[in-house]
Image (cartoon, helix red, strand yellow):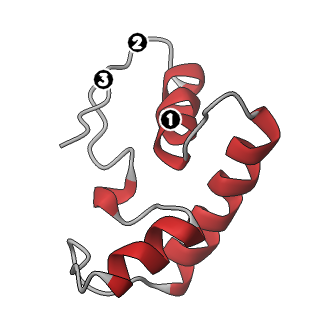
């Protein structure tokens, strides 16, 4: 199985990452963030923070997909 959008099309990011992108005037791929995108980002960021050791929002999302499904290789572009 190859799930598409495991990392939320680039929309899932920590609050610090989002603020940095907005400050730099960078647009977010796929349009504006929805409430669901923000909630998912916050949840993934909390898990990444708990894991520590350099865990990121996207690494947590990919790890979840790899754990959830036995035969999966995420498409992350």
Instruction: Please state the horizontal and vertical placement of residue 13, each as a whole percent of the image.
Output: 48, 61
Disc 1 target residue: 59
Mark 1 packing: few (<14 Cα in 10 Å), some, or many (20+)? some
Q: Earlier in the sequence, mark 1 or mark 3?
A: 3
Q: Is residue 72 left or right of residue 56?
A: left
Give the quarter of the image for residue 25.
bottom left
Residue, x 59% and y 64% (percent of image)? 40
Give the residue at the far top of this rendering: 71
Q: Earlier in the sequence, mark 1 or mark 2?
A: 1
Identify the element where label 1 is drawn: helix
Q: Using the image, determine if residue 16 lies above or below residue 76.
A: below
Q: Earlier in the sequence, mark 2 or mark 3?
A: 3
Identify the element where label 2 is drawn: loop
Q: Which quadrant holds the N terminus?
A: top left
Q: Where residue 10 is drawn, which disc sits there?
A: none
Residue, x 28% and y 81% (percent of image)? 24
Residue, x 47% and y 33% (percent of image)? 62
Between disc 1 and disc 3, the foreground one is 1
């Amino acid at each position: 199985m190859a799930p598409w959008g495991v990392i939320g099309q680039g929309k899932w990011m920590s609050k610090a990452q989002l603020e940095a992108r907005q400050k730099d005037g960078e647009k977010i791929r796929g349009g504006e963030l929805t409430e669901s995108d923000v909630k998912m980002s916050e949840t993934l960021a909390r898990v990444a923070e708990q894991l520590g050791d350099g865990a990121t929002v996207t690494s947590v999302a990919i790890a979840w997909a790899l754990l959830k499904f036995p035969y999966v290789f995420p498409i992350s572009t």
